[in-house]
Every structure is written in C-alpha cells, then in structure tokens.
Amino acid sequence: MESTEVSTTGTAIALVTCPPEHAEALARALIERRVAACVNIVPAIRSIYRWQDGVVDDSESLLLIKHPSAGFAALRDCVLEQHPYELPEIVAVNLDWGHTPYLDWIRSACS
C-alpha cells in the first residue's frame, strides 16, 4: 500500500494564547478571513510568564491554528487586529510531514 505521508513545507501550525472569553471570536475571524483552515481551541491552560517586571499567572485558552505557511503574515495581522493583549503570543511551526490529503485541504480551504 502506498504511503500518503510526504514531506512538505507548505503548511504550518500557529500557536496563539488568549483570554478564554476571546478565543471563539478570534478563531471565527481567522476562519472567516480564510487565513486558517481549522482552529482548535484548548479551553483551559495556565500560563506563567514574566511581564513588565513581574510574574503573571493567567488562565488562558490555546489556539492551534492550521494554515498555509505562506499566509503567516495575514494570519498574524488578523490576530493583532482582534487580540486584546498588547503583545500576544503568535508563533508558527512548519509541518515537515503530514497526511497529504489533509495538508492539501488546509491549503485549499484558505484560497
């Protein structure tokens, strides 16, 4: 049987944290603008981080955003428009491997 896993650099997963009450609206904006094919909302994470000379302990949601790698700038701009934080976490990891039909779907859903 032929494998459908191939190396690719055309898709990525972006990680964005936000207050739980903003997660759904942010996810919907990304989908509606076609900068993401799918957003998973992990509803309850705890983030401890240094901010403005102090240590902050926050409840947040984590967005796992599947998108074409080439569309990261548009995704970032959408997050920056919608996000309540002064400096939101917006990082992306390129996918080196994946199920080809799924990766194709990510790219086509954003075109």
Image (cartoon, grey):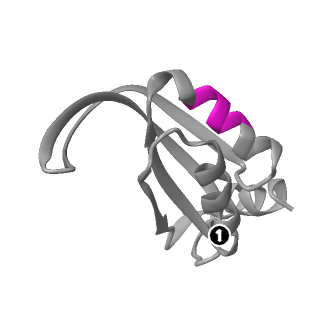
Q: Residue at x 76, y 63 (%)?
A: 107
Q: In this view, does 18 lie above or below 95?
A: above
**Residue 33 point in image, percent of width and height:** 81, 49
**Residue 100 point in image, percent of width and height:** 67, 64
Q: Nearer the viewer, residue 26 or 86?
A: 86
The residue that label 1 is drawn on is 73
Q: Residue at x 57, y 49 (%)?
A: 65
Residue 7 visible in the snapshot: yes
Q: Is residue 104 above or below residue 88?
A: below
Q: In this view, does 9 lie above or below 17?
A: below
Q: Which residue is drawn at 47% across and 47% down?
A: 16
Q: What element carries label 1?
A: helix
Query: Which quadrant holds the N terminus?
Result: bottom right
The magenta segment = 23-28
Type of secondary structure dominating the magenta stretch: helix
Residue 61 falls in image quadrant: top left
